[in-house]
Image (spheres, rainbow, N blue to C red):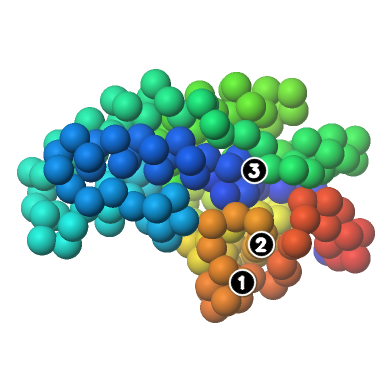
Amino acid sequence: MDYQGIIFDLDGTLVNTLEDIAESTNTILEANNFPIHEKEAYKYFVGNGLRNLVKAALPEACRQEETVAKCFADMMEVYRKNCLVKSCLYDGVKELLDQLVRRNLKLAILSNKSDELTQVIAKKLLSDWPFAAVLGLRTDFPRKPHPAGALYISENLGISPEHLVYVGDSGVDMETACRAGMLPVGVLWGFRTQEELLAHGAKVLLHHPLDLLEVLTEN
């Protein structure tokens, strides 16, 4: 297959955002006298948007709509100020993006993080590369794994889905890729397990970002 473009998830794929998300959420939990969580626990809270993350982080008995809404609003206020304190590119991502640009492949980002914060993080950490589309969670698109965002990017890039690779770290990402008719490629340095990626349709697993170059060569 002649692949012409790559769509990346953001958190857990290009950028390690876990510490900033965990610390911002724990700040709000602690302020409201709720138990806080170890950083590793947040690997299983992320992936479906920050509102759902906050809901998952709350004690089960305290997930009433009013409580979730208040804690989410407070968390967003804290996270907006701290989303770039410790977040950074994963090792090997810079080198991968350099190689993809040299090969004239089109690049895009599709995230379930709010579009506002997706744009902020992409602008700060990924502005060295020509991403043709950067799309976070917006009211005019359903969240992943619905394929609408991926298909919108496909149309925006002028590349049919079968010529696009979708790279992500979660079952949500793999399901998105499958529903959109793109090659689902899972990464093993992110937030979720190999078992989850395979169960949701991953056709290829990457141990290191540069492994993607072999996938493009072989396919």
Q: Where residue 161 sits in the image (x, y, percent)?
A: 66, 56
- Residue wearing tag 1: 194
Instruction: Identify which residue is drawn at 44% across, 46% down.
Output: 112
Nearer the N terminus, badge 3 or badge 2? 3
Q: Where residue 130 sits in the image (x, y, percent)?
A: 73, 27
Q: Nearer the viewer, residue 142 or 120?
A: 120
Of the residues shown, which amino acid type is indicated by label 3? Leu
In whole angstroms, how far apart are the C-alphas of marks 3 and 2? 12 Å
The quadrant in which the N terminus is found is bottom right
The quadrant in which the C terminus is found is bottom right
Nearer the N terminus, badge 3 or badge 1? 3
In whole angstroms, how far apart are the C-alphas of marks 2 and 1? 6 Å
Instruction: Identify which residue is drawn at 68% across, 43% down.
Output: 90
Label pair 2/1, CB-CB below 8 angstroms? yes
Per the rendering, the mark at residue 203 is: none
- Residue wearing tag 2: 188
Secondary structure, mark 3, is loop
Quick one: label 3, few (<14), some, or many (20+) residues within 10 Å?
many
Of the residues shown, which amino acid type is indicated by label 1? Gln
Q: Is residue 33 visible?
A: yes
Q: Nearer the viewer, residue 26 or 97?
A: 26
Q: Is residue 57 left or right of residue 187?
A: left
Give the image quarter of residue 73: top left
Quick one: label 2, few (<14), some, or many (20+) residues within 10 Å?
some
Instruction: Identify which residue is drawn at 62% across, 34% down.
Output: 88
